[in-house]
Structures are given as C-alpha cells and as structure tokens.
Image: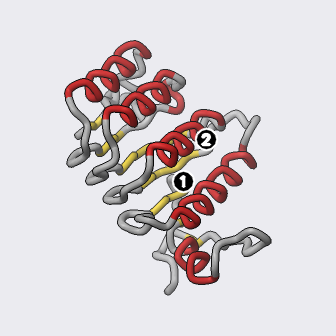
Amino acid sequence: AAAAPGRRRLPCDGGEGSPPVGAMAALGQLLNQSREGLEVRARRKLDGDHSLFEKLLEDITSKMSAKDGEAEPFVIADLDVSQNKLTFDQFEALFTQLGAHNARVLRFRMFGCPTLNDEVARVIADYLRLLTQENSPTEMHLSDCAITTEGFNAIVSAIEEGELYPLPPLTPGGKPLALYMR
C-alpha cells in the first residue's frame, strides 16, 4: 500500500539481525515521514512481539542519531504506541533514547496501555525533567492506563518543576501553547 499524500514510507534496512520478513513488512508500515516530522504508527501492533519493538526502537534511534549535534532537535510528530502491553523495560528504553538524543515528540499517544503504571509514569516524569521549551511535547494521551494519583502527581510535578509551559506561540502574535494532556 502506498503512503498517504504528504508522507513517505521509510524503508527497513533488512540487514543482519533483522526480524523476519513479516516483521520487516510490519515495521515499514509503522514509520512514516510527514511535514511535521517522523510518525510512529504502532497502535495495537507491538503486543507480544519483542523483536518488532526492538527493531522499531533501533530504527527510531538511528534516525535520531543522524540529527545529533544539529541546532534543531529531531522531531517525532506523533509517537503512537497506544493499546499495547509494553513492558517496563520497553517503556524505559524508549524514553531513555528520546532523552539521550534530545528529540522533540509533539504528540505522545500511549492511551489504553494496561502496563503503563505508576512505575512507568515515574520514567515519563524523569524524561520530562530533561526537556526544555524547545523539545517539550504539546500533547500527551495517557487515558485508560494503570496510572494512579501517585503516577499522575509525579508527571505533573515534573512539568511544574521544569516551568516548560506555556510554550511560545507558533506564529508571531499567536497565543502561548499549553500542554494538552488526557
């Protein structure tokens, strides 16, 4: 299937250590490039497939590494891993790589992840503490997860401590941007 207009599908390298051909085909459908940045479309596609998650993270990390040292951060327009049962280690690896490469994720879509609990919320909070206004998200979709008041408070405390919001307007004379979180 062809990529949607304005987006191009990113190829898999298929090199040594790559997942099976079926997983490579699936990976090719998970990453798209849009005008805003990289789009990760992994909703309901990573459950129980650790090799696919590892390959996805490897490809995202490779793309971020290529932009390391540039003035503008690498932009992930939409990081959708919603409705998957990622492990704590997978969430931790994802946020570690995002922080290590100073990437900007505009939209986090992590709703409906039953394994996104208070422990993962603390990882998210630690990641948010690394950010500046230049690489802060504009949306975080965390509904229908296993976050309790404790995890929510950890995330909100990190946001408040960083004084990240409101973000500067996108256009001159525009309104400052708040974080949309649900």
Looking at the rendered structure, the secondary structure element under dot 2 is helix
Q: Which residue is at a point 40% across and 13% down the rendered structure image? A: 161
Left or right? Give the position of 155 relative to 78.
left
The answer to whether the residues at label 1 and label 2 have Cβ atoms under 8 Å apart is no
The residue positioned 52% from the left and 49% from the top of the image is 76
Residue 171 seen from this side: no
Residue under pointer 1: 37
Q: Amino acid at mark 2?
A: Gln
Residues 166 and 63: in front is 63
Q: Which quadrant, please, contains the C terminus?
A: top left
Of residues 9 and 53, the one nearer the viewer is: 53
**Corner quadrant of residue 100:** top right
Q: Which mark is residue 97?
A: 2
Would you identify the image quadrant in which residue 155 lies? top left
Specify whether residue 107 is in view: yes
- Residue sitting nearer the eye, 23 or 62: 23
Residue 60, percent across and down? 62, 54
Q: Nearer the viewer, mark 1 or mark 2?
A: 2
Taking the image as shown, residue 124 lies to the left or right of residue 2, namely left
Seen at 31% across and 52% down, the residue is 113
Specify the amino acid type for callout 1: Gly
Q: Position of residue 125 (x, y in %)?
A: 41, 27
- Mark 1 nearby-residue class (10 Å; few <14, some 14–19, many ≥20): some
> Label 1's element?
loop
Quarter of the image where one finds residue 151: top left
Residue 56 in percent (x, y) is at: 58, 61
